[in-house]
Amino acid sequence: MGTETLRKKIYRLRVPTGLWFIIAILILAKPTLTSIFIGFIVSIFGFAIRTWAAGHIEKGKNLATSGPYQYIRNPLYFGNFILGLSLCIGANSLWVWIIFVAYFSIFYPVLIIEETNKLREIFHEKYKEYEKKVPCIFPNFKGLQGKNSKRFKFELYKKNKEYRAILGGFIIWMILILKYIFFN
């Protein structure tokens, strides 16, 4: 199996594997009141980053370079990273941390490579210039600062269906709270 074939297979498995990851979190979690509180606070930052990004991206139409895209090429993935950390904190389980690190290490490099290739194909030189100035996964507050002043658009947020991530997160946090209440 070639590298590209393996990447495509991993890319296709990301969502079902992610669902298994969430189920594992809920099964393996040993939440405490403190872990839930701290994890939830951290999750607010992850959701805020994802929300901000979703209000600036027009998938496949325009290269997003405003909002968080001025500082990081993959703010949705960065938001997911923070959300994953928040769930690990909330779950209070070494096994959840191990699963999260494994999942992120296997799937996100592939996601980034696939997305980068797609964006290079669609936006050519414009993306290559953007790529030179803005880091991939961890923000740099120099980036394109002040170069693109497009504002957050709630219509894009709705079109990108980001509310589903918040709803899913709410359900997960409710389950962790219920697990704490009934199994402690």
Image (cartoon, rainbow, N blue to C red):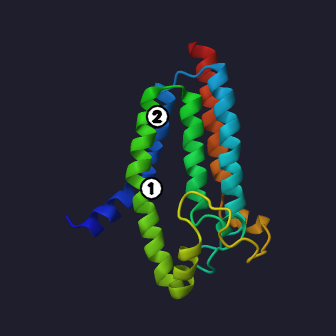
Residue drawn 53% across the image and 64% down it: 136
Where does the image place residue 58, in percent across and percent down from the top left?
65, 74
- When the figure is inspected, residue 145 is found, relative to residue 62, above or below; the finding is above
Amino acid beneath label 2: Trp
The residue indicated by pointer 1 is 108
Depth check: give the residue in front, 144 or 11.
Answer: 144
Q: Report helix, strand or loop for mark 1.
A: helix
Q: Report helix, strand or loop for mark 2.
A: helix
Q: Earlier in the sequence, mark 2 or mark 1?
A: 2
Name which quarter of the figure residue 34 lies in.
top right
- Residue pushed farthest left? 1
User: How many numbered marks have been drawn onto this rendered protein structure?
Assistant: 2
Where does the image place residue 36, in percent across and percent down from the top left?
64, 27
Asked whether the residues under the numbered discs 2 and 1 touch, taking CB atoms below 8 Å apart as contact, a structural biologist would say: no
Judge the density around disc 2: few (<14), some (14-19), many (≥20) Cα neighbours within 10 Å.
some
Depth check: give the residue in front, 17 or 106.
Answer: 106
Name which quarter of the figure residue 24 lies in.
top left
Q: Disc 2 to disc 1, how far (Cα)?
A: 16 Å
- Residue pushed farthest top? 184
The residue indicated by pointer 2 is 97
Residue drawn 58% across the image and 12% down it: 184
Judge the density around disc 1: few (<14), some (14-19), many (≥20) Cα neighbours within 10 Å.
some
- Residue pushed farthest front? 142
- When the figure is inspected, residue 146 is found, relative to residue 23, above or below; the finding is below
Where does the image place residue 12, in percent across and percent down from the top left?
38, 60
Where does the image place residue 10, in percent across and percent down from the top left?
35, 57
Depth check: give the residue in front, 173 or 131.
Answer: 131
Residue drawn 70% across the image and 56% down it: 51
Residue 41 seen in this snapshot: yes
Residue drawn 61% across the image and 78% down it: 63
Name which quarter of the figure residue 108 lies in.
bottom left
